[in-house]
């Protein structure tokens, strides 16, 4: 089983090398925090704008619907008093 033994040694050395590389990595934490805060503020502003735009759209639809309805409050069409359109042939006249 020398192949398995070599693989275990390789995995151990690789893991050790990755830990060593990670230990020597240094970053500017204040810059990361500042960039994260700026990104969070942008996302919050975008979310608020989307909510406000949606609410304004719904309000606009409501106002538009209220303005388009007749004053009676019903949207059913009123029958016309003109007799231009006659009854279809083969139908009975309406009951009195």
Image (tube, grey):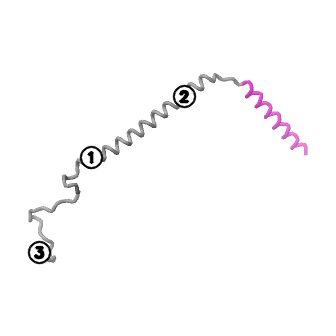
Instruction: Magenta stretch: give its range.
Output: 1-24
Magenta-colored stretch includes residue 9 = yes
Q: Secondary structure at mark 3?
A: loop
The residue sitting at 34% across, 43% down in the picture is 57
Q: Quadrant of residue 3?
A: top right
Disc marking residue 5: none
Disc marking residue 64: 1
Q: Which residue is mark 2?
A: 37
Left or right: 33 in relation to 58: right
Magenta-colored stretch includes residue 11 = yes
Percent across and percent down for residue 16 are: 80, 32
Cα separation, mark 3 vs mark 1, equals 39 Å
- Report the label total: 3
Percent across and percent down for residue 23 are: 74, 26
Disc marking residue 96: 3
Cα separation, mark 3 vs mark 2, equals 77 Å
Percent across and percent down for residue 6 are: 87, 39
Q: Residues within 10 Å of mark 2 (few under 14, many from 20)?
A: few
Left or right: 43 in relation to 90: right
Contact between labelled residues 2 and 1, with CB atoms less than 8 Å apart: no
The residue sitting at 22% across, 59% down in the picture is 76
Q: Residues within 10 Å of mark 3 (few under 14, many from 20)?
A: few
Q: Residues within 10 Å of mark 1 (few under 14, many from 20)?
A: few
């Amino acid at each position: 089983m020398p192949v398995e033994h070599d693989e275990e040694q390789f995995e151990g050395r690789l893991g050790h090398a990755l830990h060593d590389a990670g230990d020597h990595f240094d970053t500017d934490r204040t810059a990361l925090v500042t960039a994260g805060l700026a990104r969070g503020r942008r996302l919050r502003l975008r979310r608020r704008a989307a909510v406000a735009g949606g609410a304004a759209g719904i309000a606009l639809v409501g106002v538009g619907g209220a303005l388009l309805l007749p004053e009676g409050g019903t949207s059913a069409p009123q029958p016309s008093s003109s007799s231009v359109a006659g009854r279809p042939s083969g139908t009975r006249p309406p009951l009195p």
